[in-house]
Image: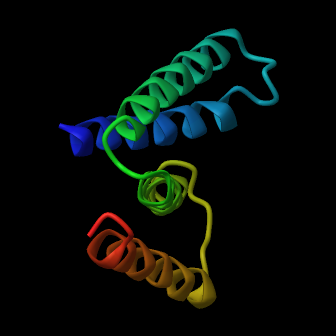
Amino acid sequence: MPYLYLILAIVGEVIGSAFLKSSEGFSKLYPTLATLISFIVCFYFLSKTMQHLPLNITYASWAGLGLVLTTIVSVLIFKEQINLISIISIVLIIVGVVLLNTFGSSH
């Protein structure tokens, strides 16, 4: 169950980040409300995750996978460009999250 909470927290973060860009500095009402709601959901499920998993694993997974998915959203939806260094960095983040979850302090 904690990994389901973590997935929901990550999805909330990604949706919130996408709407944050769409809110144009909180100048548009509906994207602003969607941003706030998404981040409330995100932090609720992140807190639920931390009841069951260590902080280091929870936060690294949330931040790392959230960053990767947010980058994918930025490329697919907002047509932003990434370069080879960005791709290499994303791969290293994924490797770090996998290693931390495999060999982290709770194992």
Colour scheme in use: rainbow
Q: Work out whether 64 lies above or below 31.
A: below
Residue 67, given in percent of the width and then of the height, sits at: 53, 59
Q: Work out whether 42 lies above or below 59.
A: above
Determine whether, in the image, residue 45 is placed left or right of residue 19.
Answer: left
In front of the other: 30 or 48: 48
Q: Quadrant of residue 57?
A: bottom left
Q: Quadrant of residue 82?
A: bottom right
In the picture, the quarter occupied by the C terminus is bottom left
Name the residue located 34 percent from the left edge and 48 percent from the top edge. Answer: 53
Residue 45, given in percent of the width and then of the height, sits at: 39, 29
Name the residue located 27 percent from the left edge and 75 percent from the top edge. Answer: 102
Determine whether, in the image, residue 70 is placed left or right of residue 53.
Answer: right
Name the residue located 50 percent from the left edge and 53 percent from the top edge. Answer: 59
In the picture, the quarter occupied by the N terminus is top left
In front of the other: 55 or 5: 55
